[in-house]
Image (tube, rainbow, N blue to C red):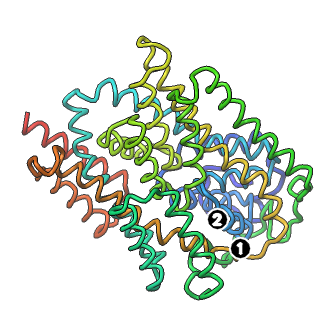
Amino acid sequence: MVDSTSAVGEQPPSQAVQRPIGLFEAFLFWLKLGFISFGGPAGQISIMHQELVERRRWISEKRFLHALNYCMLLPGPEAQQLATYIGWLMHRSWGGVIAGALFVLPSLFILIGLSWVYIAFGEVPVVAGIFYGIKPAVTAIVVHAAHRIGSRALKNGWLWAMAAASFVAIFALDVPFPLIVLVAGIIGYVGGRVAPDKFVIGGGHGAARNSYGPALIDDDTPTPEHARFRVGHLLRLVLIGAVLWTLPMGLLTLTFGWVGTLTQMGWFFTKAALLTFGGAYAVLPYVYQGAVGHYGWLSPTQMIDGLALGETTPGPLIMVVAFVGFVGGYVHPMFGEQSPFLAGAVAASLVTWFTFLPSFLFILAGGPLVESTHNEMKFTAPLTGITAAVVGVILNLAMFFGYHVLWPKGFSGAFDWPSALIAIAAAVALFRFRRGVIQVLFSCALAGVAVHVLRG
């Protein structure tokens, strides 16, 4: 196997797979990946492709893309699901659990620490200045996300019309996000049969075109025994998944009641996990509607700050839910007024559990069905419709953020010109100069501190 520190192509590809990869060796790689997986799903998938397909040769590009196409069809973070899939394919169910968990756990621990700093020291001038600068940057980042997804997904008038309709539905009519997703999926399903040429864009990543030499799991490598579909195995996984969801939910209900904060967090984020089509930005409006508007676990400003923290940490962006859980638990401590940190940490951990449990089940239960054919996935029309609708939803989220950043005291208050200038600068950096999110957030944080000092 190619040494992890060697450059691409330093050794002949045939030397990359001299022996099977042990579970501990894979564990070390997945742990490393959990700490370096910055850059959102595109960046995370790129890192895995470079490491697993090009350098280490653990899996061929065709098998890698086949797994990715399946993950793109699922609700949930596709990069984390892809890591779970490859880990499962290599080392059975425990391999998948280890790969998927290590993709998430570093981010969870980092976010718990950052969330505590945010709550405990958010009023300190330097910290306040940092968050003053990153709020307008987050607004520009969300606009950029809408543009990026829209330019890739809206290829014809039908999809543009769906995006516009979803924006009107959530912005003007306050239609719940789950209903928008459901209707968009139905339209995509029907449209894929009535006008298939209009709904063939989403989901697929195309066929493999490159070859990097033989791989441990190659194009023609037989499906391992544990990855073959068996009805008994599927039923056993479904039962285990039901227990893993019902047991903690039942204990929370018995301890805190159905209306308790932790119980409602578990129920709410279970629903959110099943609606994360099109990436984390797609489900953020639903999280906002529930966590901010309905439950009041955090404020609109805190939601913006949480998204900024999520952008600056490794792991999937949907990990922003850990921030939501921590703040909600910290502000509404359920273990007494003397233990707000414990309440926040427990809430963040439970929210993460309920958010990611479905992703593991989708991979471990659905993987054998995917492995039964290595042809390109075809059933992408519903995903195309949902992705089109998501563009309008994300644009609404950008307007929501922009309102709270530029008019922090409402339209009756003063327009915040420094925030507007920072937002414009961030947008120019993203759109014109194609700077990374981390660079933009860091620069805007410095600008926010400068504004805070000048005002101070």
Q: Residue at x 20, y 61 (%)?
A: 424
Q: Secondary structure beneath disc 2?
A: helix
Quarter of the figure that contains the C terminus:
top left
Residue 150, position as x, y percentages in the image: 42, 72
First along the sequence among labels 2 and 1: 2
Q: Residue at x 38, y 36 (%)?
A: 296
Residue 118, position as x, y percentages in the image: 34, 31
Looking at the rendered structure, the kind of residue marked 1 is Met
Tag 2 and tag 1, C-beta contact below 8 Å: yes
Residue 360, position as x, y percentages in the image: 70, 47
Q: Which residue is mark 2?
A: 73
Residue 361, position as x, y percentages in the image: 73, 48
Q: CA distance from mark 2 to mark 1?
A: 9 Å
Residue 182 to residue 114: above or below: below
Q: Is residue 178 left or right of residue 224?
A: left
Q: Which residue is mark 1?
A: 377
The numbered mark at residue 88 is none
